[in-house]
Image (cartoon, rainbow, N blue to C red):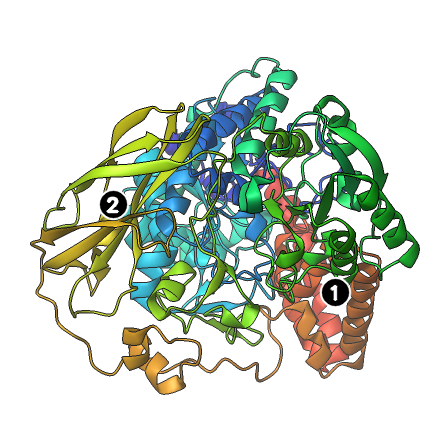
Amino acid sequence: MIDHLTLLEKAALLTGKTVWETRDIPRLGVRSLFLADGPHGVRKQSGASDHLGLNASEPATCFPTAAAVANSWDPELAERIGAAIGAEAAALDVDVILGPGLNIKRSPLGGRNFEYVSEDPLLSGSMAAGYVRGIQSQGVAACPKHFAANSQELRRMVSDSVLDERTLRELYLSGFEHVVRTAAPRTVMSSYNRVNGVYAHQNAFLLTEVLREEWGFDGAVISDWGGSDDIVEAVRTGGTLEMPAAGLDSARQIVAAVHTGRLTEAEVDARVAEVLRLVAEARTDTGPAVDQDAHHALAREAAARSAVLLKNDDDLLPLAPGTRVAVIGDFARTPRYQGAGSSTVNPTRLDSVLDTIGDSGLELVRFAQGFRRGGAADPQLVAEAVQAARESEVALCFLGLDEVAESEGLDRDHLRLADSQLALLHAVAAVNPRTVVVLSAGGAVEVADWIADAQALLHGYLSGQAGARGLVDLLTGAAEPTARLAETVPVQLTDSPAHRYFPGRERSAEYREGLYVGYRYFTTTGVPVSFPFGYGLGYTRFERSAITAVPPGADGTGGSLTVTVRNVGERAGADVVQVYATRIGDGVHRPARVLAGFTRVQLTAGESATVTVPLDRTAFRHWAGSWQVETADYLLTVADHASDPGQTVTVSVSGTVDPQPETGLDSYRRGWVTDIGDEEFARLLGHPVPDPHWSGPLGRNDALGRLADARSPLARLVARVLDRLIRRSQAKGKPDLNLLFLQNMPLRAIAKMTNGMVDLACIDGLVLIVNGHFFRGAGRTVAAFVHNWRANRRTAAQL
């Protein structure tokens, strides 16, 4: 088919037709594809398209977010959810689901952490691969994202992630490698940010050297919406599809680049083949109608298997039938069940705790709102809650993060609950110590200051449309708590290894902590945590015995650990067997523990099973210009969580290199990475630290938020108005996502997201204006606008 396409048609296929559609070539039967957001449910807009979801979308099942489902440590559950999402996508004529998200949670402050799986690449890759297999089982393409090193929302479209290649490969690429090699996604989404100075969608190292040549990926790389910088460079380096509709100027740039020799037609053909293959593999019919009741039931099951029981003193939970309870907290009436941003799903239905408590077997004494979201403590609401607690046997307090606390486009400022909620909890616990806290939040929350007020603590994360029923199932024992944390809960924010570096507020985001993210840092340094990675309680108990291991080969593959697990409690439940690897002796710097494998085993009371856990090669290899495994003894620990001493067995590995201690990286050898200076970071990078500061006049790739530094008073006024509007929306308790997007958006994205209304020449005129050259810039902008309008008419006629 490529031989029958004109060069212009080829070029046009590499940029979007609308906000959500690819281009079609009717004369050759090449249809357009429809793409939709969907990390935890399909978001297909039914009216005007706006990318960030302010306009209505078709109803779809809203499953728990990835951060919640990750706590199940169950790739098969992820696959079932993926299959349900894929089925709903097929029924809505959606060809590509933009998800799952598997960026590493570098900091608990990440505003989009609710969309991402874990701080660990093996768990992230395993769970994301389950989603991909499930989605693609329905004939719909999955699009794991955002590739790569996309860790913050602040200036996410212009920020440069600066990190050493070893950290990049071992942490931030490893999960994507697992997905590509084990689940074969048909597409991958590139991230907005630069990676070591080069935008991800035109990064030859990421897209060609690693993704295609090393991992064997042969699918389409799709830009994040507005994330394409130089379309010609993207085509040359492995970026397939520029989204959304950037207009026909992009097609003209590709054609011109071939004519001038900047691109070869063979390079264009390679990208076109990826688009055509995606079209050829797409469904040709609408999927059958879905069973919404069955999907709602799956969402309920997923919520129950994803909520983590973190505290249960004196076995307060599960609550016996007939227990007289007070239900306290605004989240019990109006649940916070998903995050804000492009992943927002219009649920087919929505349960609340107040809807479900009546058929739970519990006796509801009274509901009390307790607090207003985003507001100061209200003495009257607190007094009503205290009275309800006095009258009940158990007080159920539903607390969490407000909508404004975490969102796409906005990183969190802190890890605390609102003061109004803490005042409420303290007052309730003072009159009824049998208090259960149920949290709704997309990630980690500081608990040290208030956990003494909770006899039991259940973290529900963002649990989807059926989350209320799933949580009540856990409270009453209708379901068994089996979840384990997929991220560390630090005692306080300043304990986090990246707290001094996150978010990067200048031109670059410096990953000075290196390999020591999450539990890798805490287990190496011994810094206490509130709850470690992998931690979770249940209503039954397990014993492990008869541990044996087969060492991996020289390349780190082929190893396994076998263990017998017995349920010694009185209830059925699931144990999550976690295996951590520790090198014995000196060598290259590495964390004290690295997750080497895991499995989930379901057992009835008294039942035992012998399970074999494959050991992943990522726990043994390190990058030193190529993948190497040190010849050494390794301690394998079978543990309940990352900080658990557990049970150990030692294996001897004959690797590819002998251990060679490093010099000049003393902080990294010890793991104390919270205050790395320029000199040591430069040694880790292997080159001088790039200047992180903004300087010089503004350019195409400067964010609109930088207009505050512009020479033009008009541009500075625009920046002030934008900042004022954002602050006003936050004060109302609901961030305006379009405003946040604009603040972080580079000027060139105006040309990439207006369906060809303006081109980059127009943007160059705007750049002159904001740098103080109003008349020259205005003239160039107008002339470019007219030229682009005429060129678009000619190009459309040619197509």
- Disc number placed over residue 616 in the picture, else none: 2
Is residue 32 something one can see in this rendering? no
Quarter of the image where the C terminus is located: top right
The secondary structure type at the circle numbered 2 is loop
Q: Residue at x 74, y 71 (%)?
A: 779
Q: CA separation, marks 1 and 2?
A: 58 Å
Q: Position of residue 791 (x, y in %)?
A: 63, 51
Near-viewer residue (98 or 372):
372
**Residue type for callout 1:** Val
Q: Position of residue 647 (x, y in %)?
A: 25, 48
**Residue type for callout 2:** Asp
Label 1: few (<14), some (14–19) or many (≥20) C-alpha neighbours in 10 Å: some
Q: Residue at x 20, y 69 (%)?
A: 588
Q: Residue at x 66, y 27 (%)?
A: 60
Q: Which residue is mark 1?
A: 782
Tell me the quarter of the picture where residue 674 sits: bottom left
- Disc number placed over residue 522 in the picture, else none: none
